Amino acid sequence: MTKPSNQEILLAQPRGFCAGVDRAINIVNEALARFGPPIYVRHEIVHNAYVVSELRSKGAVFVAELDEVPRGGIVIFSAHGVSQAVRSDAEARGLRIYDATCPLVTKVHLEVAKMCRDGFTVLMIGHAGHPEVEGTMGQVTEGVFLVERLGDVEALSFPTDTKIAFVTQTTLSVDETSEIVEALTKKFPNIVQPRKQDICYATQNRQDAVKFMAPQVELVIVVGSKASSNSNRLRELSEKLGVPSYMIDGPDQLKAEWFVGKKKVGLTAGASAPESLAQSIVDRIQEFGPRQVRTLTGVVEDVTFSLPKNLVN
């Protein structure tokens, strides 16, 4: 029986790994290859259960706190970055440090530190409890305040002569962040913005790809873990565009009933989800009924980040 031409899986372009995630995973793999296990990683290297499980099987040990790392051990900081307090603690414990912080997150860290040195009160647009937010706000001891939603903007109160600036978490929704930025600039007309927006190219590109894909499909599958901010934003964006969306960690989480009566299914993957995982999910969807697979047009990313010099020299 030939596959019906009107049953399709449309793949968003781009999807999956970004340069920062690719670099972070390569750092762990390189450390394991050079030094052998165990290699300790503070928190999940990236927010993806499949990736973490795979690295754990190779000998990576993921820890919540540095006191779980033996003195003199090798520790890798995750792609989300860490506060200055965590960095100082690692040095005090005599740990060998390899930093997998995404360079685009490091850029925001440097912005915050400079703004505070220049006497600004800094507002960080982001989600409380996210490791990137904790790391960014922890670049200084005071002077940074978190803004999560529009209501937080209304509650802000500073003396009229306060110098105010803002930065953002790199993995936010572009559209929702723009609403908060608009509210901030209306309330504080002289607020200083980053020279270049903090939301990273990969987050922007993946959200744009969903905007392009959503009108063409009846269902969207997002490959990503619950802890992944950028993956959650993709699911939320699809729902906002009126298309039912499910975010899953693996093919076993798919349900056949989701696809009943759906001729066009869209699939994307968060920046921390590997293509091999996305392909296994495509294969599982096809087990529910034959579908042609078509990759949509979109941005082809060619960004790469080098490994830390202290790891490759």
Image (cartoon, rainbow, N blue to C red):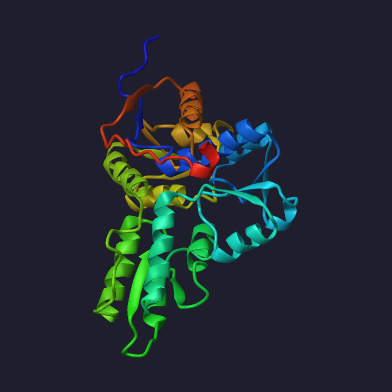
Instruction: Classify residue 216 by image quadrant.
Output: top left
**Which quadrant holds the N terminus?**
top left
Residue 224 visible, this angle: no
- Total marks shown come to 0
**Where 185 falls versus 2 (above or below)?**
below
Horizontal side of residue 51 vs 172, given as left or right: right
The location of residue 91, given as percent across then percent down, is 64, 58
The spot of residue 146 in percent (x, y) is 46, 72
Q: Nearer the viewer, residue 216 or 171?
A: 171
- Residue 107 visible in the displayed image: yes
Furthest toward the front, the residue is: 313
Instruction: Tell me what residue is drawn at x 38 percent, y 87 percent.
Output: 158
Tell me which residue sits at (49%, 71%) in the image. 140
Q: Is residue 180 above or below residue 267?
A: below
Q: Is residue 272 above or below residue 288?
A: below
Q: Position of residue 221 (x, y in %)?
A: 44, 38
Name the side, left or right, on which 163 lies relative to 246: left
Is 126 placed above or below 223 here? below
Of 29 and 306, nearer the camera is 306
Give coordinates of residue 313: x percent, y percent: 52, 38
**Residue at coordinates 52% horizontally, 36% vertically from top-left?**
26
